[in-house]
Image (cartoon, rainbow, N blue to C red):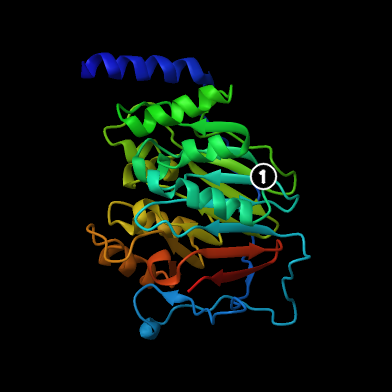
Amino acid sequence: MKKIISLLVTILFLALTACSAPTDHRTANDKVEAPKVQQTAKSEKTTTPLPAQNLSNGTKTPESNQNKQITDSAKTLKIHFIDVGQADSSLIVFPNGKALLIDAGNNVDGQNIVNYIKKQGIARLEAVVGSHPHADHLGGIDTVINNLDIGSVYMPKVTSNTKTFEDVLKAIKAKNLKVTTAAAGVKLDIDPDVRTEMLAPNNSKYDDLNNYSAIIKLTYGQTSFLMEADAQEVSEKEMLAKGYDLKSSAIRLGHHGSHSSSSPAFISAVSPSFGIISCGTGNDYGHPHKETLSTLAKANVKVYRTDLNGTIVSISDGTNITFRTSK
């Protein structure tokens, strides 16, 4: 019976797949200059960026420009790292007002994410990316699709024999949508002012589902953000070997800060000023792991964590970056 169900899920997924993405990707020639970074507080809370381990660890302070304030009226790129506990969900609102959602937490998070998106005044998502078929990333996507207007859906070309995965496919089918394969080389044409491209996955076969993770880099002016989903060192090594331009102002760290991701070589190549970790308070996995925090501390990366900071919002005007948190 399990084999029959698995076969049916695979057939449904293949039927919804619009096309396969190219697996090759050109190395970006344009260099991203070091951004001018501001750290401001949310109006109702004082926001203090968390260093990787301790404030006494000598974390670097990026160049600040106190004379330039990012206002709500400015043409900005906003990335909402939504607090979904031991799961993952990021809402990206582009300068032109269009929006992209990467993952939607667990099944129980779906309606809360929909409410959060609507609270931002958003009724349509230009694209939804299910980074890989694990329940803590894919769980709420069916609820999102059922409740919002959706332009396109991206998922890596791999299936999972779970009800969560099946529910997502059913929601996609009910909206007459197709699945576009998420892979290195795919570019998302959402805002001409923001370069949005996938740097992974770079292969079609992995032993661990985490390495199928769609990794997205967004570049806006002098600032850039790398969204790593649950990619592990295997995927990181592939990106390094291909010579991609990984350098980014901030990184959404892989696999909730696990030691299986964020290798020293990869963090060195990205050279971020800031790292964002999505993890749950007192989670059973011990995320973020001390090895990852040590790597970040040595690289002088300041860290924000959803377990300690709640929902984190980064705002870039192309030159300056501001961080706001809900805690």
Q: Is residue 179 visible?
A: yes
Give the quarter of the figure containing the N terminus. Answer: top left
**Residue in the picture at 45% in, 49% down:** 228
Is residue 198 positioned above or below 35 on the image? above
Instruction: Choose between 181 and 235: the one closer to the eye.
Output: 181
**Relative to 223, does residue 128 appear above or below in the rendering?**
above
Residue that protrudes farthest toward the bottom in the picture = 56
Count every numbered label the image shows and give the total: 1
Res. 161 image quadrant: top left
Q: Amino acid at mark 1?
A: Ala
With respect to residue 109, does 235 lie above or below? above
In the rendered view, does 153 fall on the left or right side of 52? Answer: right
Residue beneath the point at 28% across and 36% down: 208
Choose between 74 and 25: the one closer to the eye.
Answer: 74
Question: Closer to the camera, 200 or 139?
Answer: 139
Name the spot of residue 278 as percent of width and height, x first.
Answer: 40, 59
Crowd around label 1: few <14 · some 14–19 · many ≥20 (10 Å): some
The x and y percentages for residue 202 are 43, 33
The residue under label 1 is 123
Taking the spot 26% from the left edge, 32% from the top edge, the residue there is: 207
Q: Secondary structure at mark 1?
A: loop
Residue 296 x/y as whole percent: 38, 67
What residue is shown at x 78% (from left), y 65% (from top)?
Answer: 73
Q: Is residue 262 visible?
A: no
Foreground pick, 76 / 109: 109
